[in-house]
Amino acid sequence: MPSRDDTVGDDSGRIPAPATVTFHDTLRTAIRRQRLTLQVVSRRLGALGYPVGVSTLGDWQHGNARPASVPAVHALEKMLGLPHQALSELIPRIELSERSGALGELLDQVPGARDRNVDVLSRQDRAWADEAGRIWRITSRVVLRARRDGVDRYILRYFADAGSVLSRIDVEAVANCTVGQVRWRADAPVIVAELCFGQRLRAGETWLLEYRWTNPTGESSTVLAHAVRHRLELYTLELVFDPAAPPAECHAFTQTDYDEPIRPTAALELNTHHTVHLIGTPLLTGLHGIRWRLRD
């Protein structure tokens, strides 16, 4: 999207919006209006308890990444002399609702996708970040229990990072399943896919399956999370960093909803194998994941 570098402020403290108001245009103009460098903005945010690196701020102001922390954006608004929510209300959102929007429409295309036919007893996710900071692969190992007779599939929801080309994202069956229908739309970063067991389960019967997503596209990221809609007895998430691009810092977090503040739960130290992990047991609802800050 073309930028509007010529935008100027008025006496009210508000920034006149370009024809299409965007988070990155508004942020970039506000920083220039205050004659601040990204180094100064990063240092001031850090002093307020929001460690945001210079490279991350650069991505924000050029539309290459979206902030994951709304409180940090509120601090940024105050620092830049902007009205409350002048920036936060412009953050691009991923629609998580299954009742409407792109996700709802995709689920409607897969018969039975909305039915709660299984309980997830445990889930193990392992993800890899490449040298550029992209999450390029995620493998998942899931233990399910049928809630009724006749269950023969499991429905996946995948939310891609900004800049992803959905047609190039691949979902592969690794163990005890095959890939069925795969549905996506070019205008929304979400994919719905079926994993078929190859047999029907009885009520109470368990099933273990494994699959992986590979995404050669997308932009660098600083957050990875799993959305829990129903009780999950055991969840583990391991993140493997490229040895050439270790994070400056890393922590586990929870979030009651996508639009709610992120709550850090534990600092995570990179081990000798360049990985960090979190373990949750049990989990009810909300988002649970890992955030990190890239080195400048």
Image: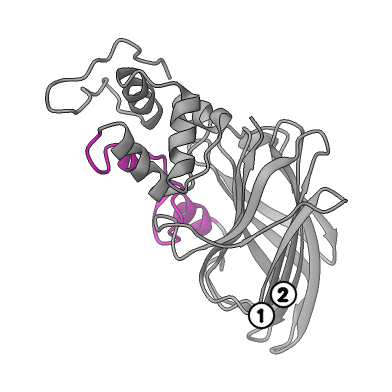
Q: How crowded is mark 2: few (under 14 residues within 10 Å), some or many (20 or more)?
A: many
Q: Residues within 10 Å of mark 1 (few under 14, many from 20)?
A: some
Image coords of residue 112 (percent x, y):
56, 68
At 76% from the left and 35% from the top, the residue drawn is 245
Outermost bottom residue: 204
Which residue is at the front of the view, 252 or 25?
252
Q: Helix, strand, or loop for circle 1?
A: loop
Q: What residue type is labelled 2?
A: Ser
- The answer to whether mark 1 and mark 2 are in CB contact below 8 A is yes
User: Would you place residue 166 above or below residue 159 in this image?
Assistant: above
Which residue is at the front of the view, 6 or 111?
6
Image coords of residue 3 (percent x, y):
39, 16
Q: In which image quadrant can residue 247 be found?
A: top right
Residue 210 shown left or right of residue 27 in the figure: right
At 51% from the left and 72% from the top, the residue drawn is 285
Tally of numbered discs: 2
Image coords of residue 53 (percent x, y):
56, 34
Residue labelled with disc 1: 233
Q: Helix, strand, or loop for circle 2?
A: strand
Residue 72 shown left or right of residue 127 in the figure: left
Q: Which amino acid does label 1 sit on?
A: Glu
User: From which residue to which does the magenta span run?
Assistant: 82-109
Outermost front residue: 47
At 52% from the left and 43% from the top, the residue drawn is 51
Image coords of residue 290 (percent x, y):
63, 55
**For the stretch drawn in magenta, what is the main secondary structure?**
loop
Mark closest to the chain's N terminus, 1 or 2:
2
Residue labelled with disc 2: 122
Q: Does the magenta stretch include residue 83?
A: yes
The CA distance from mark 1 to mark 2 is: 6 Å
Q: Quadrant of the N terminus?
A: top left
Q: In which quarter of the image is the C terminus?
A: top right
